[in-house]
């Protein structure tokens, strides 16, 4: 996302780029990210988040290195499509974080990592121009050459990050991804010391492994959890293990997970909130410039950057608030209600901005800042709920939800593309859509009935 924003920023280097060209490049970039996110989710379930993460970074580093060869507007649009691959790294990032943190704090962890990543879209407006100016002033490179060199620097950083990730990082808290089923079995066996009778120990030790599906055979425990309200401590342990172990994806299991109503709720919610963010990031600078021409392109860009940078604070705030409500209430309905409440408030701010006559910079900055808080907090609260929904297919659900956000960005950017400079109308239309969509899915259960935590 960081490098994609910069390639958009440097689009100004091609004076022949029209407004429609820039809009098309924004949309194509999101389409690439959407496709990668859809496939990355299942890849995380199959190969683990670490290898999926590193692969996406290395694939995205290649077009980044080739950015300096672009000489035409069409080439820049194609470049943004392929650099959009890097946006898919969000999925393994969230899946990997989910694997390392307990459900009581996973929202905070997910929202912090995602918030810092999204903040890169705001940092871009300050950091990359600073590197560019340094190359021009200290290395005496021309603007034509310097902006291309900045991409080489980025290629080195991205590649180095991927290599370090492969060499030094673990797949899971217990070891490698391929041995996760055996690790679960081993930890269950270790819990024998807590069982008081020999019969109990035999019950636990009777578990067997299914090496073909990389999973512990605990499906019967899921069935028992759906039919029995009272369970012994060891039953609770086995039931929890049966719902938490990520299984190798199959067509049948994937179709079942995706078709669940709670999955639809997450997709709709993220379609709205992250769709807003993806739409606003590329047009907000132009909106400021349209309302206050005296700011100029640079000044408008700096004001617009505030929206992205606030991700570092607002998105983690959403995850933290969601976790806090969950710990005190003990119910996933608390997380879900918060997600919809924040989303609807974001929609209300969009409507206000669309209807209000913005006559001062303070007024506009205040409204945009309020919008940023609710939009970005809603994003954080959404991925606080994601780990609870179909956790045996966590990568798939994460990928579908993340891809829905990109789809929202595509739809909302299409609205912006055909609205020209009528930015107030864009905000109004999107705000109404967001409010309506969240009301429509607000009645759906947080997780399916019968799933652990769903009854």
Image (cartoon, grey):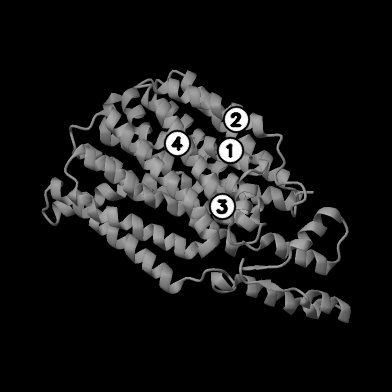
Count of numbered tags? 4
Residue under the point 55% across and 32% down: 346
Earlier along the polypeptide chain: callout 1 or callout 2? Answer: 1
- In the picture of the structure, the residue carrying the numbered disc 1 is 269
Q: Is 65 placed above or below 291 here? A: below
Q: Secondary structure at mark 1?
A: helix
Q: Looking at the picture, how far across and down is residue 278, in whole percent?
A: 43, 38
Q: Is residue 301 left or right of residue 355?
A: left
Q: Secondary structure at mark 3?
A: helix
Figure quadrant of residue 162: bottom left
Q: Looking at the picture, how far across and down is residue 392, in whole percent?
A: 64, 58
- In the picture of the structure, the residue carrying the numbered disc 4 is 409
Earlier along the polypeptide chain: callout 3 or callout 2? Answer: 3
Q: Residues within 10 Å of mark 2 (few under 14, many from 20)?
A: some
Between disc 3 and disc 4, the foreground one is 3
Q: Looking at the picture, how far across and down is residue 156, in whole percent?
A: 28, 62
Work out how far the residue at label 1 is from the one at label 4, CA to CA, in angstroms.
13 Å
Residue 85 visible in image: yes
Between disc 1 and disc 3, the foreground one is 3
Between disc 3 and disc 2, the foreground one is 3
Q: Secondary structure at mark 2?
A: helix
Residue 252 or 314: which is nearer the viewer?
Answer: 252
Q: Does the residue at mark 1 contact the one at mark 2 (Cβ under 8 Å)?
A: yes
Work out how far the residue at label 3 is from the one at label 4, CA to CA, in angstroms.
20 Å
Residue 48 visible in image: no
Work out how far the residue at label 1 is from the one at label 2, CA to CA, in angstroms.
8 Å
Earlier along the polypeptide chain: callout 1 or callout 4? Answer: 1
Q: Which mark is residue 396?
A: 3
Q: Does the residue at mark 2 contact the one at mark 4 (Cβ under 8 Å)?
A: no
Earlier along the polypeptide chain: callout 3 or callout 4? Answer: 3
Figure quadrant of residue 97: bottom right
- In the picture of the structure, the residue carrying the numbered disc 2 is 437
């Amino acid at each position: 996302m960081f490098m994609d924003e910069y390639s958009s920023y440097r689009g100004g280097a091609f004076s022949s780029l029209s407004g429609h060209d820039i809009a098309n490049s924004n949309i194509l970039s999101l389409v690439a990210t959407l496709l990668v996110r859809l496939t990355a989710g299942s890849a995380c379930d199959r190969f683990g988040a670490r290898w999926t993460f590193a692969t996406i970074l290395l694939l995205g580093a290649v077009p980044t290195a080739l950015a300096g060869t672009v000489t035409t507007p069409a080439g820049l649009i194609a470049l943004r499509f392929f650099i959009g691959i890097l946006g898919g790294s969000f999925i393994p990032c969230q899946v990997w974080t989910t694997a390392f943190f307990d459900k009581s704090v996973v929202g905070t962890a997910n929202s912090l990592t995602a918030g810092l990543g999204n903040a890169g879209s705001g940092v871009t407006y300050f950091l990359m121009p600073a590197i560019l100016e340094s190359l021009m002033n200290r290395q005496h490179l021309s603007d034509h050459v310097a902006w291309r060199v900045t991409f080489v620097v980025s290629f080195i950083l991205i590649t180095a990050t991927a290599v370090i990730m492969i060499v030094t990082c673990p797949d899971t808290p217990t070891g490698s991804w391929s041995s996760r089923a055996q690790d679960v079995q081993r930890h269950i066996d270790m819990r024998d010391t807590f069982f008081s009778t020999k019969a109990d120990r035999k019950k636990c030790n009777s578990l067997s492994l299914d090496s073909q599906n990389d999973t512990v055979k605990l499906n019967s425990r899921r069935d028992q959890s759906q039919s029995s309200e009272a369970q012994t401590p060891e039953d609770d342990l086995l039931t929890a293990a049966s719902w938490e172990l990520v299984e190798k994806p199959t067509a049948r299991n994937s179709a079942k997970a995706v078709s669940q109503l709670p999955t639809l709720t997450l997709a709709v919610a993220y379609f709205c909130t992250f769709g807003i963010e993806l739409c606003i990031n590329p047009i907000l600078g132009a909106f400021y410039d349209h309302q206050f021409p005296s700011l100029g392109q640079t000044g408008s860009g700096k004001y617009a950057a505030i929206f992205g940078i606030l991700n570092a604070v607002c998105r983690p705030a959403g995850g933290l608030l969601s976790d806090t409500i969950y710990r005190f209430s003990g119910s996933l309905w608390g997380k879900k209600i918060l997600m919809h409440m924040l989303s609807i408030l974001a929609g209300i701010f969009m409507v206000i901005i669309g209807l209000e006559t913005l006559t001062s910079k303070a007024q506009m900055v205040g409204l945009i800042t309020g919008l940023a808080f609710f939009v970005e907090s809603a994003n954080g609260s959404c991925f606080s709920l994601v780990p609870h929904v179909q956790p045996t297919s966590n990568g798939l659900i994460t990928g579908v939800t993340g891809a829905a956000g990109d789809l929202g960005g595509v739809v909302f950017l299409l609205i912006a593309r055909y609205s020209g400079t009528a930015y107030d109308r864009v905000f109004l239309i999107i705000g109404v859509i967001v409010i309506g969509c969240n009301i429509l899915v607000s009645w759906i259960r947080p997780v399916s009935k019968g799933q652990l935590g769903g009854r």
